[in-house]
Image: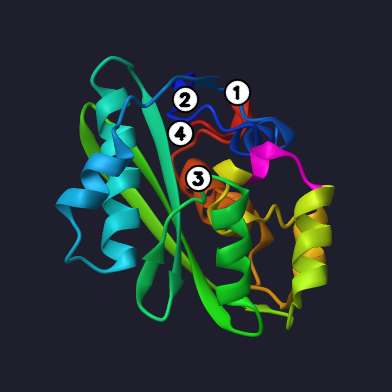
């Protein structure tokens, strides 16, 4: 089944996860104003906000792309509050200080849209426990990473230096990196889209 698959994201990490799995896809900008949606949902739970953003990304891209559109979003829930991406290194330092020695939940919602409808959705809730980080460790870590870290939830990339910060992480490393690949590939398998010979 030659159904076009589109990833509604320009995230290099998400693209790499699909590319490594040899899934054929194209990428598009989702065009969703994430800050505006977060502002309008200020009374909602972190999971509700993350799921809404993933759905909006896929639906908006689905309006101008045929086939299946994958949308994904992540959010960090610390004590029931959504932690936004750090805007600068001062904010990054403050976030790491607040997360030091504590458990947070990294919420990853992955959805698939087709013809402007959500047809599949999966939410992963990774329990992440940071080591106790003193000022010197936080400073050393932030000096070892570049500005791309500011575009990442929690100012860490688990597949890179970020792993040093953790005492314990969630069981699904794919979800932690940005897409719930095992459930997603199961969905594609069930619908005959994972292998050429897998078509129904």
Q: Nearer the viewer, residue 11 or 65?
A: 11
* Residue 57 higher or lower than 124, as above or below: above
The residue beneath circle 1 is 24
Say few, some or many: other residues with alpha carbon within 10 Å of mark 1 (under 14 / 14 to 19 / 20 or more): some
Q: Is residue 97 visible?
A: yes
Picture quadrant where residue 135 is located = bottom right
Q: Percent position (x, y) of residue 176?
A: 61, 59
Q: Percent position (x, y) of residue 193?
A: 51, 33
Q: CA distance from mark 2 to mark 4?
A: 17 Å
Say few, some or many: other residues with alpha carbon within 10 Å of mark 3 (under 14 / 14 to 19 / 20 or more): few
The residue beneath circle 3 is 87
Q: Percent position (x, y) of residue 19?
A: 69, 30
Q: CA distance from mark 2 to mark 3?
A: 32 Å
User: Which residue is pictured at 54% across the width and 48% down the height?
Assistant: 179
Q: Nearer the viewer, residue 86 or 42?
A: 86
> Between disc 1 and disc 2, whose residue precedes?
2
- In what element is the residue under mark 1? loop
Q: Are marks 4 and 1 in contact (CB under 8 Å)?
A: no
- In what element is the residue under mark 3? loop
Residue 200 has which mark? Answer: 4
Q: CA distance from mark 3 to mark 4?
A: 47 Å
> Between disc 2 and disc 4, whose residue precedes?
2
Left or right of 32: which side holds 88?
A: right
Q: Are marks 1 and 3 in contact (CB under 8 Å)?
A: no
Which mark's residue is nearer the viewer, 3 or 4? Answer: 3
Stretch in magenta: 145-149
């Amino acid at each position: 089944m030659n159904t076009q698959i589109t990833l509604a994201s320009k995230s290099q990490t998400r693209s790499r996860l699909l590319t490594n799995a040899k899934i054929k896809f194209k990428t598009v900008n989702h065009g969703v104003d994430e800050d505006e949606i977060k502002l309008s949902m200020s009374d909602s739970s972190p999971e509700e906000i993350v799921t809404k953003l993933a759905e909006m990304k896929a639906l908006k891209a689905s309006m101008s792309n045929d086939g299946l559109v994958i949308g994904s979003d992540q959010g960090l829930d610390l004590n029931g509050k959504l932690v936004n991406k750090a805007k600068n290194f001062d904010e990054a330092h403050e976030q790491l200080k607040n997360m030091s020695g504590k458990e947070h939940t990294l919420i990853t919602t992955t959805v698939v849209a087709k013809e402007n409808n959500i047809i599949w959705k999966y939410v992963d809730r990774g329990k992440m426990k940071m080591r106790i980080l003193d000022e010197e460790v936080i400073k050393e870590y932030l000096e070892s990473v570049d500005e791309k870290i500011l575009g990442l939830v929690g100012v860490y990339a688990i597949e890179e230096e970020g792993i040093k910060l953790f005492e314990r992480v969630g069981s699904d490393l794919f979800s932690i990196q940005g897409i719930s690949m095992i459930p997603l590939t199961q969905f594609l398998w069930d619908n005959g889209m994972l292998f050429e010979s897998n078509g129904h």
